[in-house]
Image (tube, rainbow, N blue to C red):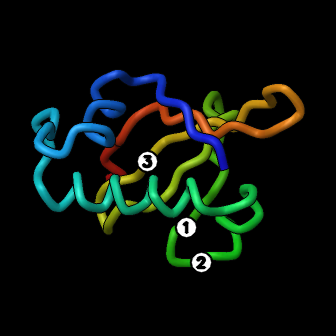
Amino acid sequence: MEVRHDDEELARVEAEEKYTAGLCPARVRAFRRLLNLIRTIGDERELYQRKSLHFEKLKGDREHQRSLRLNDQWRLIVEIEESENKRVLVVKGIEDYH
């Protein structure tokens, strides 16, 4: 699946090995691991099939967004957009789940 970043800091975290944007090492590892997985799958249906990711649609004024589990506390917030007859996962940010 194609991935695009809305947050330049997170784009750098993924691309630059030593850059962390102030995130703890465990969160950086989880983020990079999840983005590597996302890039290998065909579409978001495979994310729903992987129950451990807790891929779910958000509610209320954020119903256009979805979240993926990084760990017990942190979630990756994404949106899915149509682009040239394909779906693109847009990384919006990392948020505290609690």
- The kind of residue tagged 3 is Leu
**Which numbered tag is attached to residue 76?**
3
Q: Is there a contact, CB below 8 Å, between mark 2 and mark 1? A: yes
- The kind of residue tagged 2 is Lys
SS of the residue under disc 2: helix
Q: Which residue is mark 2?
A: 51
SS of the residue under disc 3: strand
The answer to whether 83 appears left or right of 97 in the picture is right
Looking at this view, name the residue that lies furthest to the right: 85
**Position above or below: 12 against 69:** above
Residue 73 at x, y percent in the picture? 29, 60
The answer to whether 56 appears left or right of 8 in the picture is right
**Position above or below: 5 against 87:** above
Name the residue at 43% across, 48% down.
Answer: 76
- Looking at the image, is mark 1 or mark 3 earlier in the sequence? 1
The answer to whether 71 appears left or right of 26 in the picture is right
Q: Which residue is mark 1?
A: 54
- The kind of residue tagged 1 is His
SS of the residue under disc 1: loop
In depth, the one of 18 and 92 nearer the eye is 18
